[in-house]
Amino acid sequence: MGALFCLLSAAGFGAMAVFGKLSYDAGVSVDALLLVRFGLAGAVLLIVALARGALRNLPRRAVLAGLGMGVFGYAAQAGLYFSALTRIDASLVALMLYLYPVLVTAGAVVLGRERASRRRVSALGIALAGIGLVLSGATSGRFDWIGVLLALGAAVVYTCYILVGDRVTADISPLALTALVCTGAFGTFLVTGFVRGGTDLHFAPVGWLWLGALALVSTVAAILLFFAGMARVGPSVASILSILEPVVTVIAAAAVFGELLTPTQWIGGALVLSAVVIVQWPTPGRRARQAGRQTAAVDSSASARVAAVRFFGAADQADTHIS
């Protein structure tokens, strides 16, 4: 059942971009989407975290760190991601965002948290070559460089978010951190909307259906399914299974919007996902570290990378806080 939970979680995350575009078709703005998504998801996750005791006796520093990551880091990443969706195809956004596991590896090496290895350098080269093919083969009328830069910006901000979060959130459970990050991001978009004179929530009624799906299916359900799956199969297997996420996005976007990748883009996408597998595939050394203390930055992100807010917890933390 653990593998099934992880696959269902990846499918939920993969549908996020499609729900976002369907919301836009109903007249929902980017600001309204982000406000409702984080408001609804944050409220539900806070209730779940309270019910499970995940928020009990949290240090003030941990609470502030979680909220701060939502206010500054995840709000910025989500804003770039969903803004990119207004300009380019969902499949392109999904594949470009999926550079981040390789970028996290590169960042960990640069910061001295991990040592450079032939495998990591090869993965980086493969990923960059894959993204080059994805972009060079883009022939859709909705393709533009502003959208590309927004999507790549989301991947870069996400990378920084993971590398920073790995250092400041070691003393907080994944579920509690997820709830706090969503709440912090909601605060950002609430204040932003107030400064701009209010967020327009007057859109077609069907827009609320897609926003509800975005918040409850592609955020809350996907997170909780991932927790349940990772508790049963471990972070390394869960991370590898999560590679289904961009595949679901590509297939769903083709079915709903008629978005089609060119043969060159399919090859590029396959290279990007292959690089992710290379980075996340467990080695004997990694398995030994996971059996003991909390792992280093790349392993920590691997255990956490598919939650909606990409929480940062080691395997032992997830096992402790999942019933």
Image: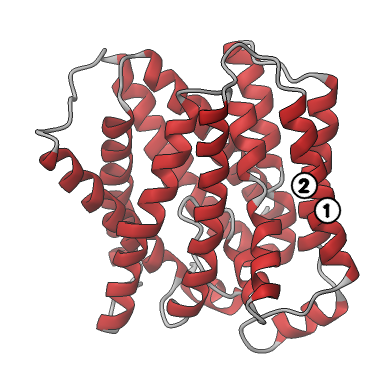
Report the Cα–Cα distance between label 1 and label 2.
Answer: 5 Å
What label sits on residue 128 in the rendered view? 2
- Please say if 63 is above or below 73: below
Tell me residue 33's x, y (percent): 32, 32
Q: For residue 79, which quarter of the picture?
A: top left
Tell me residue 256's x, y (percent): 58, 14
Q: Are marks 1 and 2 in contact (CB under 8 Å)?
A: yes
Q: For the residue marked with disc 1, what is the amino acid? A: Gly
Residue 235 shows up from this direction: no
Q: Nearer the viewer, residue 214 or 279?
A: 279
Q: For the residue marked with disc 2, what is the amino acid? A: Leu
Q: Does residue 128 appear left or right of residue 51 in this picture?
A: right
Q: Does residue 119 appear left or right of residue 74 in this picture?
A: right
Residue labelled with disc 1: 125
Q: What residue lies at 24% left-to-right and 44% top-to-bottom?
A: 189
Residue lying farthest to the bottom in this orientation = 292
- Please say if 1 is above or below 197: below
